[in-house]
Structure formats: structure tokens, C-alpha cells
Amino acid sequence: MDIFALLWIVSLAFTGLTEGAGVLPDGPLNAAVGGKVMFTTTQTPGTTFVTVNWKFEYEGRITFFMSTGSLELRNLTLNDIGEYSVTMFLPEAPAQSGDTRLDVYEPVTNVTVTSSSTELVEFSSVSLSCSSSGSSLSFLWLNSSSEVTGSDRVQITDGNSTLTIVNVTRYDQGPFSCQVFNPVSNGTSDPLNLTIYYGPENVILKISPPHKHYQEGSDISLMCSAVSNPLAHYTWFLNGGLLSKGSQFNLINSQKNQSGSYSCQAFNDKTLRYETSHPATISVLALVTNVVVTSEPTELVEFSFSVSLSCSSSGSSLSFLWLNSSSEVTGSDRVQITDGNSTLTINNVTRYDQGPFSCQVFNPVSIGTSDPLNLTIYFPQGCSVGCIAGIVIGVLVVLGVVAAIVWYCFHDKKKPNKKLSAENTNARTGVEGQDNGAYTTSQELHNADVCFTKNNNGGTVQMGDQNKPSDYAEVRVNNNPRAAASSLPTYDAHLQRNKRTAPQPETAEL
Ligand SMILES: *[C@@H]1O[C@H](CO)[C@@H](O)[C@H](O)[C@H]1NC(C)=O
Ligand SMILES: *[C@@H]1O[C@H](CO)[C@@H](O)[C@H](O)[C@H]1NC(C)=O
Ligand SMILES: *[C@@H]1O[C@H](CO)[C@@H](O)[C@H](O)[C@H]1NC(C)=O
Ligand SMILES: *[C@@H]1O[C@H](CO)[C@@H](O)[C@H](O)[C@H]1NC(C)=O
Ligand SMILES: *[C@@H]1O[C@H](CO)[C@@H](O)[C@H](O)[C@H]1NC(C)=O
Ligand SMILES: *[C@@H]1O[C@H](CO)[C@@H](O)[C@H](O)[C@H]1NC(C)=O
Ligand SMILES: *[C@@H]1O[C@H](CO)[C@@H](O)[C@H](O)[C@H]1NC(C)=O
Ligand SMILES: *[C@@H]1O[C@H](CO)[C@@H](O)[C@H](O)[C@H]1NC(C)=O
Ligand SMILES: *[C@@H]1O[C@H](CO)[C@@H](O)[C@H](O)[C@H]1NC(C)=O
Ligand SMILES: *[C@@H]1O[C@H](CO)[C@@H](O)[C@H](O)[C@H]1NC(C)=O
Ligand SMILES: *[C@@H]1O[C@H](CO)[C@@H](O)[C@H](O)[C@H]1NC(C)=O
Ligand SMILES: *[C@@H]1O[C@H](CO)[C@@H](O)[C@H](O)[C@H]1NC(C)=O
């Protein structure tokens, strides 16, 4: 096998030897085991040679190319590694020679990555190693498609064939692959994925709809989420007590007693870690209903009475506001608001305190308002300029009416068949329970002719329908002088009639 051979070719002329200035490429030439190599000279094709002498290990696997003097060697083995040289004799030219080196490599095949583990918990470590057949191998690691470089966390050792990640993170799942090179070939491993378990973290409790307060009966949905691989398992707690499992918890037709502090806990069964959400407070409130104001007492005398109004309502988390007519009542020396604003006390009432008072009740989900309540306050009455003018006008009108009636009576006195349309029974019914004066008045009217009226301070006589041929008069007598000026009785009157029922305008209808 190891034969040094001298190859000859056509020899025509000999013109002397010149030291070859490198008719072969600089070496080494790299070739794979079993492959072939071409020793290509720098001669242009068609050169005429006298002699070409090739010096190399001969194995009978060669082809010589006449036109350039180049040589091809096939079915290479590791034994073909070595120095090769050539000397060329050209006609009428100095001899040329060259030498080079041939390296033969085992090609890269079967590149494989193995991992100490492919399922990892975050922050543990993992080692990947790359193996390949071939000679003179060099290794390169790829993370997805970018080259992995060493760092604190990432070590590349064993001539770059081992990749160690000291502290894996969730972002290290790869795919990792290994590329192997030698001068004649290269190979790439299959990609390898790492499964990295992490979490739970960022446990978030979401409430839908997102309110702080809910009406009793509303449907509330609580959802829990966490960053976790694999997906976390969730457990719900109310005020620290276990409620249920699952990523969602629904409050259907929520009740007041379901108010409280909710939280969810996430668990990862690979990392065996737990994490709990921030607590979320849910308050379920009953609506404000049945707002009622009661007062004690309701009838008062100015400057000598205190009154206490209390407001009651159903509902939860109530707050109260008092209105006097439409403006808010605020506390003062005279006015106290107590019992969490549910009681309004007015000391030393004045005539201006009759209200109407109402109570507004709030909670965060609703509002209710009571019916207005009027206080009846008795006070001594004076008479203003307007009142005096009113009385004067009233008196003038009455005098005019009296004059008209008197004139009418005398004018019609002679007419026969004059009828009085007045019903005693009605008159009596109308004055039932009233002062006897009313009865007396109607008696007087009955006994007197229609033309007579006891015009007792506000009594009026109205004429019947003027178009009717048969005339009659409707007589309306108000026999209670106190009721004439005002719907409210006077201070004195009230004192006299102390403890009687509410005063009514006293009228007798005839
Ligand atoms: C050289 O290789 C070819 C194919 O690659 C093969 O057919 C042949 O037998 C080999 N010859 C020797 C001498 O090894
Ligand atoms: C590839 O390499 C593995 C181990 O490195 C070996 O078990 C297997 O036989 C090799 N396959 C080939 C085709 O060389
Ligand atoms: C390992 O890889 C680095 C970067 O690619 C390279 O500089 C170094 O020469 C390699 N080491 C070996 C022993 O191949
Ligand atoms: C691993 O990495 C994380 C974040 O990159 C860091 O917080 C932790 O301290 C590291 N652990 C170790 C053992 O290096
Ligand atoms: C792999 O690539 C991802 C991003 O592409 C990066 O976050 C991660 O740190 C890389 N891992 C290693 C070991 O290079
Ligand atoms: C790997 O070899 C192929 C031919 O086998 C070549 O085309 C490719 O460029 C080589 N890759 C590298 C990175 O050298
Ligand atoms: C590895 O992960 C990539 C995406 O990161 C995916 O496309 C690929 O199918 C995975 N390969 C395996 C073997 O799981
Ligand atoms: C909450 O109240 C409802 C009635 O409103 C009652 O049926 C239920 O048992 C109560 N639940 C708790 C935990 O007290
Ligand atoms: C009630 O108020 C009036 C006027 O504001 C005052 O003159 C009187 O003294 C008060 N009475 C009491 C008992 O405070
Ligand atoms: C009572 O009302 C006042 C004024 O509106 C308010 O500032 C106060 O907080 C209320 N008190 C209560 C117990 O609701
Ligand atoms: C109610 O309002 C009237 C006038 O609007 C006022 O004179 C009176 O003092 C008020 N009473 C109370 C208790 O606020
Ligand atoms: C209360 O008084 C107001 C006027 O001040 C009046 O309009 C209202 O009808 C009264 N309500 C009752 C129930 O007496």
C-alpha cells in the first residue's frame, strides 16, 4: 500500500529544471474519508509537458489530467494524509514544482443532543450534551435560530459540546439544537424543547361587574387568574374560610350575609407552589325601602314646645339627610340631628317650622325619601296691613250685598207665591257637633223671611239662578267668626279648646 510512485508522462524535450514556484495550491487540502481530492495545478489547460513527476502515496485510485498535469485521488482514507509534491518539465521553459498537504477527515454524521432532563422547574439547572461521529469536530449551540453564548447562567464546556443552564427560566424552552462542523462537513441535531414549569404568580382576582357595593339579589362573578405552567388550580376563600374550587366563583342572587373579603389561591402541582390573590371586598346591601318619618308631638305651640322627628327605614348601611321643604336641615342651637342623623329635634319651635319636613335615606346602592310631614304650630295672630285692607274690602262688599238684598226684598214684597227653599234637615246636619249658634242661626233664617239674614261676620247670602222664574235663595252662613280670617285657629282659640280634635273650618250650609 505505502508505495511511493513516480508518475511519468510523455517526455518530448528537456530544457533544464527550474525550482517550482508553487504550481499547486497552498495546503492543506481537506477531504473526507471515502471522498476524493483533486490536486489542481496552476497550469492553463492545453499545456504541453515534457515530464510531470508526482510524488505521493500510491494506491491505484488516481486519475491524471493531461491538459493541466493535475491529479485526482479517490476513495480517500485517513492514510492518505500527507505531503504531496509535483515537478513539471515544460518544453523550452524552466522546470516547475509545487507541494501541498492533504488532510482527510471523517465526515460529521449522527449529531444528537441529549438532555439531563427535559421537564424542569424554573430556577433549577439542566445540562445538554451534543454528540456526533466525525473527526476534528467543533460545536455550536443554537437557541431557536440564534447562537447561544456563555453567561453567568449559561456555561458552554467540553470543547463546546456541553451546554449547561445553571438557572433555567421560563424563557429557556428552546428549541435548542447543536451544529457540528469539521473542515469537510457539518451536521445539525434535531431541535430539543425543554418544558419549564413555573408559577403561580400574578394571581389576580377579577370581579364582574366591578363594583364595591351590590344590591341584594344581584349576580356577581369572581374570576381568578395566575401566570402558571402548567395551569394553576384555584381555591376560593371568604373571610379566610374555604368556599369552593375552580377558576370562577359565582354569587347568584347574592345575599347580605355573603358580603366579606374574598380571595383566591392558585396552586401549581408541578412546582408545588401556592400563591394567594389580594383580597377583594364585596358588600351586598339591601335596598332602602319604607322610609317613614314619625313626629312626637305633631301639634305644637310656638316658643313652648320641642318636637322630635325620627326617620326609620329598612335597608343596610343607611345614612340620613333631613329636608325642610327642599333645603337640607343643618344643626344649630335650636336644631339637633342625632342618632346617626336619623333623629331631628327642634327645640322651641317657631311658626316658621311647619315644614314640610322629609327624610332622605341613602345607602351606596339606593336612595329613598319619606312622605313630607307638616307640623301644626299655633301662634298668636296679629293683623298686617294687607290683612286690614282685606277686612275693609270684605266689609264693603258685605254692605253692598246687604243693600242689594234689602232693595230686592222690598221690590218683590208684593209678589205672591214667594217660596223659601231652605231645608232645615240639611242645616241641622251641617252644624252637627258645632256651637249652638249655628242652629240658632238656621232657626232665625227659617223663621225670618228670606229677606232677612243675620249677617254675622262673614255670613253671605247668594242669589239663586237669575234666569229661573221661580226664585229662591241659597243662604250660606258661617257662624264661627274665628274661622273667617284664616284656616288656622288663633292662638287664644287653641288654648281654649286645648286637647280637642284638629280645628275644622265651621260652616253651616242651608
Ligand atoms: C472506490 O469507491 C467506489 C465508490 O465510492 C467503489 O465503487 C470502489 O470499489 C472503490 N475502490 C476502491 C479501490 O476502494
Ligand atoms: C448515532 O449515535 C448514537 C449515540 O451517539 C448511536 O447510538 C447510534 O448508533 C448512532 N447512529 C449512527 C447511524 O451512527
Ligand atoms: C467554542 O466556541 C467559541 C465561540 O463559538 C469559540 O470561540 C471557541 O473556539 C470554541 N471552542 C472550541 C474548543 O471549539
Ligand atoms: C435565578 O434567576 C433568577 C432570575 O433571573 C434570580 O432571581 C435567582 O436569584 C437566580 N437563582 C440562582 C440560584 O442563581
Ligand atoms: C433562548 O432565547 C430566549 C429568547 O429567544 C432567551 O430569553 C433565553 O434566555 C435564551 N436561553 C438561552 C439559554 O440562551
Ligand atoms: C454545511 O454543509 C453544507 C453542505 O454540506 C453547506 O451547504 C453549508 O453551508 C454548511 N453549513 C455551514 C454552517 O458551514
Ligand atoms: C418545540 O417548540 C416549538 C415552538 O417553540 C414547536 O413548534 C415544536 O413543535 C416543539 N417541538 C417538539 C418536539 O415538541
Ligand atoms: C345567608 O342568609 C340566607 C337567607 O338570607 C340563609 O339562607 C343562608 O343560610 C345564610 N348563609 C349564611 C352563611 O349565613
Ligand atoms: C324661644 O325662642 C324665642 C325667640 O327666639 C326666645 O325669645 C325664647 O326665650 C326661647 N324660649 C326658650 C325656652 O328657649
Ligand atoms: C350626619 O350628617 C352630616 C352632614 O351631612 C355628615 O357629615 C355626617 O357624617 C353624618 N353622620 C352620620 C353618622 O351619618
Ligand atoms: C325651615 O325652613 C324655614 C324657612 O324656609 C326656616 O325659617 C325654619 O327655621 C326652618 N326650620 C328648621 C327646623 O330648619
Ligand atoms: C303640608 O304643607 C304644604 C304647604 O306648606 C302643603 O302644600 C301640603 O299639602 C301639606 N301637606 C299635608 C299632608 O298637610
Image (cartoon, rainbow, N blue to C red):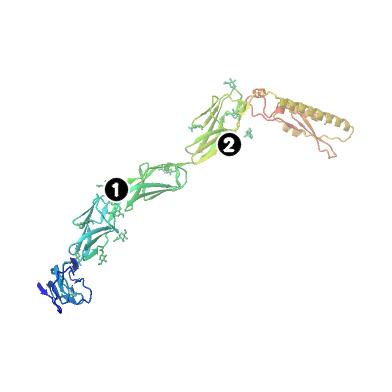
Q: Secondary structure at mark 1?
A: strand
| Residue occupying image coordinates x 25% and y 58% | 141
Q: CA distance from mark 1 to mark 2?
A: 60 Å
Counting other residues with Cα less than 10 Å from the Cα at mark 1, is it few (<14), some (14-19), or many (20 or more)? Answer: some
Residue 500 location, x and y as percent? 64, 27
* For residue 28, above or below residue 253: below
Going from N to C along the chain, the mark reached first, 1 or 2, is 1
Counting other residues with Cα less than 10 Å from the Cα at mark 2, is it few (<14), some (14-19), or many (20 or more)? Answer: some
* For residue 397, above or below residue 203: above
Give the amino acid at mark 2: Asp
Residue 89 location, x and y as percent? 15, 74
Give the amino acid at mark 1: Arg
Residue 306 location, x and y as percent? 56, 25
> Is residue 139 visible in the rendered structure shown here?
yes
Q: Nearer the viewer, mark 1 or mark 2?
A: 1
Residue 224 location, x and y as percent? 38, 49
**Apparent side of residue 470 relative to residue 481 in the rendered image (left or right):** right
**Apparent side of residue 372 relative to residue 315 in the rendered image (left or right):** right
Q: Is mark 2 within 8 Å of ligand 12?
A: yes
The residue identified by callout 1 is: 273
